[in-house]
Amino acid sequence: MITRMSSLFLRTLREDPADAEVPSHKLLVRAGYVRRVAPGGYSWLPLGLRVLRRIEDVVREEMDAIGAQEIQFPALLPREPYEKTGRWTEYGDALFRVKDRKGADYLLGPTHEELFALTVKGEYSSYKDYPVVLYQIQTKYRDEARPRAGILRGREFVMKDSYSFDLDDDGLSRSYQLHRDAYIKIFDRLGLEYVIVAATSGAMGGSASEEFLAVAPTGEDTYVRSTESGYAANVEAVTTPAPPAQSIEDKPEAQVHYTPGTPTIATLVDYLNDKTDLGRTFTAADTLKNVMVKIRRPGQKDWEILGIGVPGDREVDTKRMEASLEPAEVALLEESDFAANPFLVKGYIGPKSLQDNGIRYLVDPRVVTGTAWVTGADKADHHVVDLVAGRDFTPDGTIEAAEVREGDASPDGKGSLVAARGIEIGHIFQLGRKYTDAFEVDALGADSKPIRITMGSYGVGVSRLVAVIAEQHHDELGLVWPRAVAPADVHVVIAGKDETVAAGAEKLAGELDAAGVRVLLDDRKATPGVKFADAELIGVPTILVVGRGLAKGVVEVKDRLSGDRQEIPVDDAVAHLVKLVRS
Ligand code: ATP
Ligand code: MG
């Protein structure tokens, strides 16, 4: 097919859009691939839609190759199934809820576990029917708190979601592994640099779970990996190894100290070391910082105040804390909360008053029985030294809320951690029976006894991938698409007003087209400078310049990525390009 730029519905922009921060957003808008319609809502213009469709094709081929079968659900879904699993409320503010004219509740599907489980239950009944893997490539809706970076985080976006249904855990492991392998093929074919990391399963419930993160400094996800083993995890999923419990007996008595002018951990540590005579040196890691938050469970009106204790040398990582408390919503305490709870002495909050006043207190896993801490004494300007866990206070549980730092020991005991950023492009997890329990999805076994089906759920952010590929494949001039997804194979630029140049380019375009090469032909009445700039911005991997050289029987082939130019005889051009495109 020849796409003529003289009639293509495309206007490139010279300026970056004002709201764009990341390169992919700037370039996809400037090159005329997408246009903003609403916060987190984008339309696909012809070139953008082509890239999206090519990605869909790669995803579809690899899903079909593992025997997954494509189906399609509506995006507009009834409330009942989501009510049944609790997600109507659990999904919180991210769920678009709508009413029909009769007042019945509907939602715009954010993910479709419920519908797939119900559909399999409706069609299948015998153990002989299983396993089965179903998928769809479909528009999803999530009222994201922070739609961001154009199509990278939209409120309407395209996802490939698949679901496996197996009779037992071994079957589930196999289905999971098949998806893992398929995802590796997909992301390799798309030319992405990515890592596979351990993940939390979030609001979906379930156990084994991994994310595919495209390596990108602009990514919202932080992951760590070990310097000495294969360990890699999203920071949200890093579990802190608990040190062994210590004996309580040999610990000194807890003592309250007057510590004026110590509003921060640093000033407190200095004070203890300079102004007290405790016979040892303190560091921030000896202090226990108590951070107060409030949480609200889905569907509930009231907030619960929660105390979180972390070693004073670490900050609380909001994303880790929120992931640990999911699906509850988390907020910081406000002045009015402190006013309503006068036992909370700001800056000097200790475990004791929390426990005396029935406030739940969760601690970092390092706070094991027998560890002694310097912490707030619940009285202005006072701290308590040698407050011993398991003796002077008993936490209500542990929480992964403290930041993970580079240099921390790897949780698998091998090496230390290094950190980098990425963008989530895929997520696979073994859901187990949460949804099949909710809907009683059973198969009748060979012995006529029912077998509860176990499920896996697997997502690929198809529309996000357009942006992620752009994020990894661009330079200062514009986009540089990998061949597998480029909107055309060859961008033919007619560089010159001469009739014979135009005719020569048309002829080459026609021959390329006949050979199955997808051609974008710049046949506009514009200067060569404008055309070259647009070609570089649009990012077709190979540019064929037909210009003055034609009179001498040569054309120029430009590699968009390397910038290399090569003059070749016009008679060899088609064969040369066909070979290039197929390589
Ligand atoms: P994130 O942490 O980025 O919000 P998620 O954990 O909510 O992602 P899943 O529910 O596992 O994501 O969805 C599967 C895939 O869909 C993700 O791996 C991601 O690539 C894509 N995705 C999720 N939310 C969005 C969005 N708002 N816009 C575009 N793609 C998205
Ligand atoms: Mg999300």
Image (cartoon, helix red, strand yellow):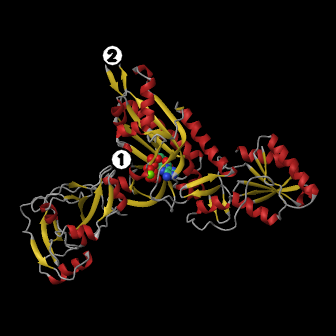
Q: Quadrant of the C terminus?
A: top right
* Residue 268 in picture, x, y percent from top left: 22, 77
Q: Amino acid at mark 1?
A: Glu
Name the residue furthest front: 102
**SS at mark 1 in the image:** helix
* Residue 337 in picture, x, y percent from top left: 25, 67
Judge from the rendering whether residue 570 lies leftward or rightward of residue 66; answer left or right.
right
Residue placed most toward the observer, 359 or 271? 359
Q: Who's the residue at 47% across and 35% down the image?
A: 178
Residue placed most toward the observer, 120 or 164? 120
Residue occupied by mark 2 = 448
Asked whether the residues under the numbered discs 2 and 1 touch, taking CB atoms below 8 Å apart as contact, a structural biologist would say: no
* Residue 116 in picture, x, y percent from top left: 45, 33
The tag on residue 308 is: none
Q: Counting residues from the N terminus, which is met first, the one under dot 2 or under dot 1?
A: 1
Residue placed most toward the observer, 505 or 417? 505
* Residue 62 in picture, x, y percent from top left: 56, 37
Q: Amino acid at mark 2?
A: Ser
Q: Residues within 10 Å of mark 1 (few under 14, many from 20)?
A: many
Judge from the rendering whether residue 476 lies leftward or rightward of residue 287; answer left or right.
right
Residue occupied by mark 1 = 90
Where 409 falls versus 99 (above or below)?
below
